[in-house]
Amino acid sequence: MKTVLIADDSSFMRNWIKQLLDDENYFVIAEAENGVQAVEKYKVFLPDILILDITMPLLNGIEALKQLVRFDSKAKIVMCSSLGQQPFIIEATKIGAKDFIVKPHFKNLNHILDKIS
C-alpha cells in the first residue's frame, strides 16, 4: 500500500481527497494545511506520493515544491490547482512535479497516482 501526504489549505479538500484514496490502495499518512507543514511533514513521513496544492498560506505550493525537490530529487509530487492556474502548472512540471490535477475534477486521481508510483 502506497503512502500519501495531502497538502491543501482547505480541510474540505483534504477530507475529500482522503475519502477518494481510502477506497483504493493508498494510505494517507499525514495532512498539511500550508506549504511549511507540507515540507516539514514530507521530511518526517517520507510518503510515496505528495498531493500538493499550489495556492496555500505561509509558503505556496511552487516554493514548497522547490524545497522538496532539493531535499528529494526523486519525490513523486502531484500538483493540485484550480482552473486558470496553467502558468503555475507549467512551472511546477519544470521544477519537478510528476503530474497535476485540476480541482475539483478528481475522477482521474487514482489513475494519475498509479501512473507515477
Image: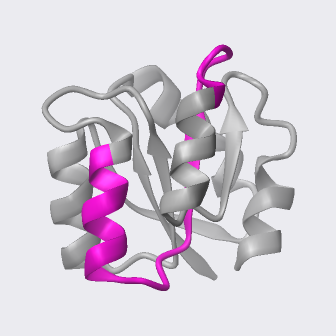
Left/right of residue 107 with respect to residue 30 in the rendered view: right
Q: Can you give x and y, in whole percent of width and height, for residue 32 in the image? A: 28, 46
Of all residues, the one furthest to the top in this rendering is 84
User: In this picture, is 111 found above or below 104?
Assistant: below
Residue nearest the observer in this picture, 52 or 15: 52
Left/right of residue 107 with respect to residue 5 in the rendered view: right
For image coordinates 74% across by 55% down, the residue present is: 23
Q: Can you give x and y, in whole percent of width and height, for residue 80 in the image? A: 57, 38
- Look at the image and tell me in which quarter the C terminus lies: bottom right
Q: How many marks?
A: 0
Left/right of residue 86 with respect to residue 46 in the rendered view: right
For image coordinates 38% across by 26% down, the residue present is: 55
For image coordinates 44% across by 34% down, the residue present is: 54
**The image quarter in which residue 8 lies:** top left
Residue nearest the observer in this picture, 86 or 49: 86
Residue nearest the observer in this picture, 11 or 74: 74
User: In this picture, is 20 found above or below 8?
Assistant: below
User: In this picture, is 7 found above or below 38?
Assistant: above
Q: Can you give x and y, in whole percent of width and height, for residue 39 in the image? A: 22, 60
94 within the magenta span: no
- Look at the image and tell me in which quarter the N terminus lies: bottom right
User: In this picture, is 22 found above or below 91?
Assistant: below
| Region in magenta | 63-86
67 within the magenta span: yes
Left/right of residue 111 with respect to residue 109 in the rendered view: right
For image coordinates 64% across by 68% down, the residue present is: 26
Residue nearest the observer in this picture, 17 or 22: 17
Colouring style: one colour
**The image quarter in which residue 89 lies:** top right
